[in-house]
Image (cartoon, grey):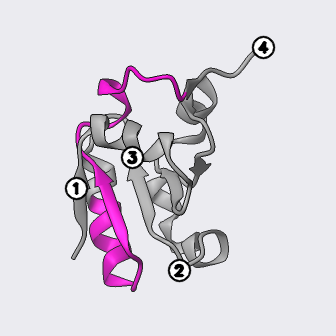
Amino acid sequence: MFRTISVQQLEYLLDGERTFTLLDVREQREYEAGHLLGAVNLPYERLDEVEAEIPKDRPVVIYCAYGGQSLLAARELAGRGYDTVNVLGGLYYYRGKYYVTCKE
């Protein structure tokens, strides 16, 4: 089982102590165009590699563009023993201060 939070709740989490891993499951090119500060990029198609990249000893807060892939990823990772949290709506709905764009 996994939990779901809104983008407003995500902002609250990001304001606090980072006791979780923030996971962006979008494609690398999307991540490079803009992402949340401190996020680890592991595209949904590469979730098989998650255990080499993401520790199980802390919650994993997962987001994507609109919420669909992060929902699937949260379900899949929860089944593998991760404590997962899905961000409802995804990055498209986030307008907070932790959005960063990559500079050319």
Residue type indicated by callout 4: Glu
Q: Nearer the viewer, mark 3 or mark 1?
A: 1
Instruction: Tell me if residue 64 can be seen.
Output: no
Residue type indicated by callout 3: Tyr
Residue type indicated by callout 2: Lys
Q: Nearer the viewer, mark 3 or mark 4?
A: 3
Residue labelled with disc 1: 4
Give the image location of residue 15, x and y in percent: 49, 39
Q: Where 57 falls versus 20 (above or below)? A: below
Numbered mark located on residue 104 in the image: 4
Screen quadrant of the C terminus: top right
Query: Bounds of the magenta span?
Result: 72-98
Residue labelled with disc 2: 56
Residue type indicated by callout 1: Thr
User: How far separated are the C-alphas under marks 3 and 1?
Assistant: 10 Å
- Nearest the camera: 76 or 86? 86
